[in-house]
Amino acid sequence: MGPFVHGGVLAWACASAMGGAISSTLGAGEIAATIDLEVRFLRPAPIDSGMITGIAEVQHSGRRLHVASVTLEDERRRTIAIGSGPMLVVPGGIRELMRSKLPDEIVGADATDPL
């Protein structure tokens, strides 16, 4: 076994896959911001082990909170890591980004609104 894919890269892959799944459920003009991310690393991922695939699905779609989970698999379909996490849905977030507001300004202003 050689060098391994860094855990931070695998966590990024989990977050990206879950974000894509949640984005597919958003309404027009909505954005979602990650609240938390939990990743469990189950086996090492050698750099030369081939393609790593993320399979994500939305577990909960509330009005303001969505939750997704993901499984990362290697080319042999062995599970490398599993992850889950919630995202805050921000109505009108796209409009605010177009007005050159920073994401922290958009989410921060929206955080006072009850979930």
Image: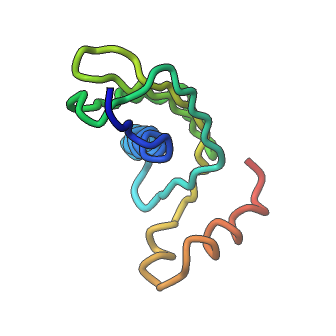
**Which residue is at the front of the view, 50 or 1?**
1
Q: Name above or below for residue 105 compared with residue 36.
A: below
Colour pattern of the rendering: rainbow
Label count reads 0
Q: Residue furthest bottom?
A: 100
**Residue 104 placement (x, y as % from top left):** 63, 72
**Which residue is at the front of the view, 19 or 52?**
52
Q: Name above or below for residue 46 compared with residue 112.
A: above
**Residue 73 placement (x, y as % from top left):** 34, 23
**Residue 84 placement (x, y as % from top left):** 56, 31
Figure quadrant of residue 24:
top left
Identity of the residue drawn at 55% across and 78% down: 102
Identity of the residue drawn at 39% across and 56% down: 28
On screen, residue 95 versus residue 34, left or right, reads left
Identity of the residue drawn at 65% across and 49% down: 35
Figure quadrant of residue 80:
top left
**Residue 11 placement (x, y as % from top left):** 49, 41
Q: Residue furthest front?
A: 2
The quadrant the N terminus occupies is: top left
**Which residue is at the front of the view, 84 or 46?**
46
> Is any part of residue 4 visible from this angle?
yes
> Is any part of residue 25 visible from this angle?
no
**Which residue is at the front of the view, 19 or 25?**
19
Identity of the residue drawn at 38% across and 27% down: 72
